[in-house]
Every structure is written in C-alpha cells, then in structure tokens.
Image (tube, rainbow, N blue to C red):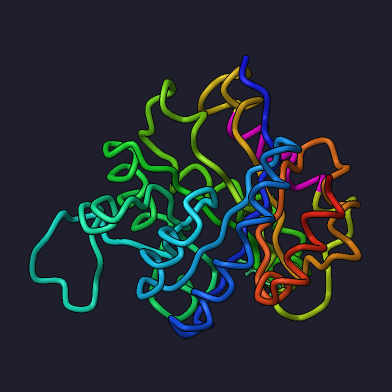
C-alpha cells in the first residue's frame, strides 16, 4: 500500500498579478528544495494567468489550476479546458471550492464531470467539500459531506481513485479566522475516509490524501497535521506571503 505523503497547497484565489506571482515563484525555489528533502509535497494554485510563469520559474513546485471545464473545447465563453492546461504542464486542479459553489453555481454534479474528465486525462483533482455555518449548527455536517463526496466522486474507477486528493473546508472557517478545532477536523476527515472506503474499499481509502482547509495559519498547522486522518492543508490567506508560506512549511517538517 502506498503511504500518504504530506501535502501543503496554497490556494491564491483571485490574488497576485503576474508580476507578484513571478516574484513569489522565484522565492519559492528554496522552499521546494526544503520540502523535497523532508518528503513533503508543496504546491500553489495561482490564477490561470500565472500558471505557466510559476511553473517555469519553479518546476519543482506543484502548480494547480483553481478550476477547469470538463469539455475539451467549444462554445464555453470564459472557460479553460484540460488540453489547454496540459499543454503548459499543469496536471492538478482544485475542483468544487466552496467559493465556486457559492458564486459560480458549481454543484457536486458538475464537479463530478470535471473530476471524471481529469482522471481520464491523468490529472489530479483536489476535490473540496464542506458545510455552511447553518448546516454545521443544525448538526448535519456529515450528511452534507457524505453527499458531496458520493456525488462528486461517483463513477471514479477504483484503480484511479487513490490519486485523488480531498479537501475538507468547513465554509464557516474559510477566511474568518474561526478555525474548526483539530478534533472536529479530524472527526470529519475520518468520516470522509469511511465514505471513501464504502466507495473504493479499505486499501484505496487509506491511500487517498485528505487535507484540512479553513483559517490554517503557521501557528495552528502543526496541530491539524498531527491528526490521524489529516494529510495536509489547503491554505488561502496565509499562503500568499512567502514568509508565511515558509513558516507553514517549516512548522510541519
Ligand atoms: P483561508 O485559509 O484564507 O481561510 O482559506 C481557506 C481556503 O479556502 C483554501 O482553499
């Protein structure tokens, strides 16, 4: 069985101009060396505009898109396809981030189409799930997350599933500074692994990496990563500044 390598992924959202992204990429080269020496996978998800430049400047950092379209080409104004990404060497993408679900009408069903297209093209999806504050307060977190996982990852072949990365991001903790406690995060991530086991069997479920995201900072990252079922972090705000990104990495070495 494959062991789960730790993964630290920065989601830049709609931040950084090309010039700013290039400066970050240059400074990140030494961090990639440090990550590699310590068997940690390090990555960033810039805007489409900056993907190619970041990849060129630091070929050793994982460069992920923040979204993509499931069709190869066609009349889809404003969209970016898998062949376009692959041509510039991009093999990863975040899928179903809650901000896309909230502002762009993304559903678990549309995520499923994207994930199946990615897998058919040997790409790695980082599939996001997580409940709203209202759902959390109503005690239905697990039902929501279960549905997101079952729908989003439906029809993924068992042999391909271990490459998928899942990110649990409770919406109430994103950008709010209100963290889910380590205990809550662990409980939900363990539950996600149970759902993955139902879908893909125990061996594959143990190989799939599950990240926690939501107000992860250099001060709290270590605690999350010490939880049994949390294999890394998807970080927004604290990944934007290179010094802070460095601290995130150093604190999980
Ligand atoms: P913050 O780390 O800014 O809370 O964002 C989390 C997130 O949405 C990462 O995808």
- Above or below residue 123? Residue 96 is below
Residue at horizontal 56 percent and vertical 67 percent from the top: 26
Q: Is residue 92 magenta?
A: no
The one nearer the camera, 121 or 202, is 121
Q: Position of residue 195 (x, y in %)?
A: 61, 35
The one nearer the camera, 186 or 36, is 36
Q: Position of residue 112 (x, y in %)?
A: 37, 49
Rendered-image quadrant of the N terminus? top right
- Please report the bounds of the magenta region as a residue range: 186-196
Quadrant of the picture in which ligand 1 is shown: bottom right
The one nearer the camera, 117 or 238, is 238
Which residue appears farthest toward the top when viewing the image? 1
**Image side of residue 199 versus residue 38, left or right:** left
Which residue appears farthest toward the left when viewing the image? 74
Q: Position of residue 242 (x, y in %)?
A: 70, 71
Q: Main secondary structure of the magenta part?
A: helix
């Amino acid at each position: 069985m494959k062991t789960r390598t730790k993964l630290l992924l920065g989601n830049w959202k709609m931040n950084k101009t090309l010039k700013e992204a290039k400066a970050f990429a240059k400074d990140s080269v030494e961090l990639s060396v440090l990550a590699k020496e310590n068997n940690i996978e390090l990555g960033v998800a810039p805007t489409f505009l900056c993907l190619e430049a970041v990849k060129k400047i630091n070929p050793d950092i994982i460069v992920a898109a923040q979204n993509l379209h499931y069709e190869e080409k066609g009349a889809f104004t404003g969209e970016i396809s898998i062949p376009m990404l692959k041509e510039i060497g991009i093999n990863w993408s975040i899928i179903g981030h809650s901000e896309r679900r909230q502002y762009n009408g993304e559903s678990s069903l549309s995520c499923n189409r994207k994930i199946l297209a990615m897998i058919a093209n040997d790409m790695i999806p980082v599939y996001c799930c997580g409940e709203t504050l209202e759902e959390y307060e109503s005690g239905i977190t697990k039902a929501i997350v279960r549905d997101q996982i079952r729908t989003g990852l439906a029809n993924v072949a068992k042999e391909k599933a271990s490459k998928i990365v899942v990110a649990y991001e409770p919406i109430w903790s994103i950008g709010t500074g209100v963290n889910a406690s380590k205990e809550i995060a662990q409980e939900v991530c363990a539950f996600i692994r149970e759902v993955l086991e139902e879908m893909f069997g125990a061996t594959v479920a143990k190989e799939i990496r599950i990240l926690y995201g939501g107000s992860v900072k250099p001060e709290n990252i270590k605690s999350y990563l010490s939880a049994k079922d949390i294999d890394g972090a998807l970080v927004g705000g604290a990944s934007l500044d290179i010094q802070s990104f460095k601290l995130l990495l150093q604190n999980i070495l």
